Image: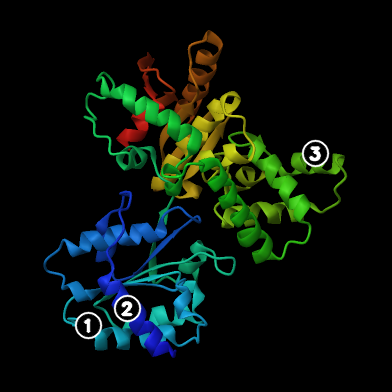
Amino acid sequence: MNTKEKLKLILQEWWEYDLPTTYTRKFDMSYLDHDEILSIIGARRAGKTHLCYQIIKELRKNTDIPPHNILYINFEDERLYPLNGDELTLLLDIYREMFNVDMQKKVYLFVDEIHNIENWSKWARRINERYKNIKLIITGSSAKLLSHEIATELRGRTISFNIFPLSFAEYVNANNITFDPKNILYSQDRFQIKKLFNNYVQNGGFPATLASPKPEELLKEYYEVMFYRDIVERHSVTNIKLLEDYLALLIDQTACKFSISKTAVKLQEIGYSFSKSTLSNFLNYAEEAELLFPVKKYNFKLREQMRSAQKIYAIDHGLLQTIRFGFMENIGRILENIVYLELRRSNTSKNIFYYQGDKECDFLARQKNKVTAAIQVSQNISSPETNKREIDGLLEAMQALKLKNGLILTEDEKDTIQIDNCLIEVLPIWYWLLAQ
């Protein structure tokens, strides 16, 4: 079967296809109002394809958009193989031949796993420049082209939306739980919400884990694919055992400060020989694959910021527990990872820092070159020692950065603490997550 016939088959099937039920993700439809290509990027299995389906469902509700002006195609479909390289070139012509497309109105063209086609970026740039009424929405992830590189390939012609595993608010919604956000702290509904939060803490937010009878096995498979396809194969890593043990050490240090030099000593002690640049490269590979995220110390001097120890966080707290963690003994660090991911959903990694002076504060969030939030995370602050440590670290950061308000997030405490002109709010993490 030639390319034209294969495309006709796939496009006709798309028109007859009933979209599957999806978990609702937080997405601002105004992303579609821009002239640039929309790139939906993110880690493997985080839900890029299902977000496309969600957007399509929303578009179909708009009666001003002709039904045939919405098209989706996935270039992972095995029936398109072997790919001849002309699939994208022919796509638009065949689409217009087969369907009643109103080119005077906006056309929404979803191309999933676009990286599978050679010269895809040249095609995308041409369509974007030539057809101003066509809104391109693309996704992609593979060992050949990681999702964030899609934006790089398009050279300033794209706006990116980074999708992460489910937030807790999305997780609650996926379980069909409704609640009154104003009264949830005191309502009987909070017991159901807290039970869900315990499940979320243990299993994480990858969408497929909700329906899986064995989420741990599924998460192990996700890690294997990220490890071998997105890191080993992509970067032709030869010392796989060194990479495996190095990532294990990094994951063990989730929510802790680490340095490549100190980690190198641990690996050398068990017999490995390597250069420090190798470990630096390995960390970059893990970050590119959106498996691990390093966070820098906040410092006005860029050189000092770069020289300081970093903290490490993982793409999903369920995933990291499956790989390395014993659940209960590391609950405080799991909670900190959850808060980090929530901050990442509304910030880029360059806008999240930790503070270190005489004391330490877990997170500083910066917007438009100004620090706007200081946050501590702790399982609880019931003991005098923990209470003092968390408050002192937060206060030091607030005073250094001239912030009047600070936040301490715990498993289940609520309080307001006034110290001089600084106001510290203590909130349950699950409640704060629902308010984001």
**Residue 177 located left or right of residue 384:** left
Q: Secondary structure at mark 2?
A: helix
x and y percentages locating residue 391 in the rendered image: 48, 18
x and y percentages locating residue 370 in the rendered image: 41, 42
Q: Let me know if residue 337 appears in the view.
A: yes
- Among the two numbered marks 2 and 1 on one chain, the one whose residue lies closer to the N terminus: 2
Q: Which residue is mark 2?
A: 11
Q: Which residue is mark 1?
A: 99
Q: Which residue is mark 3?
A: 266
**Residue 304 located left or right of residue 340:** right
- Among the two numbered marks 3 and 1 on one chain, the one whose residue lies closer to the N terminus: 1
Q: Secondary structure at mark 3?
A: helix
Q: Residues within 10 Å of mark 1 (few under 14, many from 20)?
A: some
Q: Secondary structure at mark 1?
A: loop
Disc 3 or disc 2, which is closer to the eye? 2
Label 3 and label 2: CA atoms lie apart by: 55 Å
Q: Which image quadrant: the N terminus? A: bottom left
